[in-house]
Amino acid sequence: MILLAATPIGNLGDASARLRSTLEEATVVAAEDTRHTAQLLRLLGIENRPELIALHDHNENERAASLVERARSEDIVLVSDAGMPTVSDPGFRVVQLAAESGVPVTAIPGPSAVITALAVAGLPTDRFAFEGFLPRKSGERGKVLRELAPERRTLVFFEAPTRLATTLADLAGAFGSERRAAVCRELTKLHEEVRRGSLEELAAWAADGVRGEIVVVVGGAEASEVSPEAALAEVQERVRGGERLKDATRAVSEATGLSARELYAAALADRA
């Protein structure tokens, strides 16, 4: 079978007894970075030296089939550099193909930066969405953020420290400067830090530079108190003022959380 094994995201003490015993008995480990995994084995005091096969973003598509086929006759342990494989890490294609091929897949639960950040952020946890890394190009990033602005679930992002200040400023611009958020840095490590505040406050704090591995948690949009009728009237007023219908519906949607598609359709129907 395929065994997805969660590894520590910082503190080696978070390695479970099940993870240790699995690595002690493994004959084959597919790893995001074989050098990193070899070091992890040494640090955990694992004497076993399994065959290490590199499995990363650039070769997963071509290696998935051979790993799944091999898993028909022996266990394949799959690990990423930290946390649970397949969650913004390699492994998805292997699991997808294994499921299609009837090869069993199981998981050895453990550390997750997404869940850890969500738990400590101090923001609602009943409903959330993980968005991974935002696009690097400003135009693409802006488009994604405009689409996410009315999302009422708590949002979780990964970000590189060198791009954190820019991303927080973009979030403030798209979501509103007062939207509550938390920047979780170096989770489970010696210099762990959770900085909470508004997006505007966090952007100003990050402007001086931040180091370490970063998870950003952003509170969801407040429920709109604007009725669909009032929102439609606002769209119509904007159009009379010279805005294109598409731009007007998008702006009102972002401000109210109401569906841009439904506002657009209602405006067209009202014209008929």
Image (tube, rainbow, N blue to C red):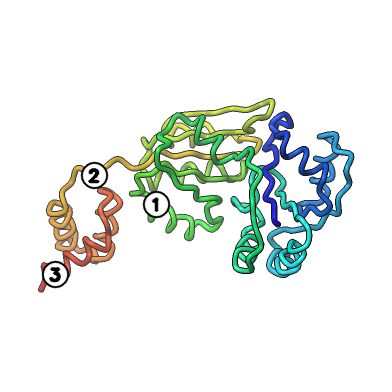
SS for callout 1:
helix
Residue 17 pos. (x, y %) = 73, 34
> Quick one: 158 or 163, which is closer to the camera?
158
Q: CA distance from mark 1 to mark 2?
A: 15 Å
Residue 261 pos. (x, y %) = 27, 63
SS for callout 2:
loop
State the residue position of label 1. Answer: 148
Q: Residue at x 62, y 53 (%)?
A: 86
The answer to the question of whether label 3 and label 1 lie on touching residues, with beta carbons closer than 8 A, is: no
Q: Earlier in the sequence, mark 1 or mark 2?
A: 1
Residue furthest toward the top? 190
Q: Residue at x 67, y 50 (%)?
A: 4
Q: Are there few (<14), some (14-19), or many (20+) residues within 10 Å of tag 3?
A: few
Tell me the quarter of the picture where residue 154 sits: top left
Question: Hey, what amino acid is under mark 3?
Answer: Ala
> Quick one: 93 or 136, which is closer to the camera?
93
Q: Are there few (<14), some (14-19), or many (20+) residues within 10 Å of tag 1?
A: many
Q: What number is the disc on residue 224?
A: 2
Question: Hey, what amino acid is under mark 1?
Answer: Leu
The C terminus - image quarter = bottom left
Q: Residue at x 16, y 57 (%)?
A: 232
Q: CA distance from mark 3 to mark 2?
A: 23 Å
State the residue position of label 3. Answer: 269
Q: CA distance from mark 3 to mark 1?
A: 26 Å
Tell me the quarter of the picture where residue 30 sits: bottom right
Determine whether, in the image, residue 46 is placed left or right of residue 176.
Answer: right
**Residue 140, above or below 188:** below
Q: What number is the disc on residue 102?
A: none
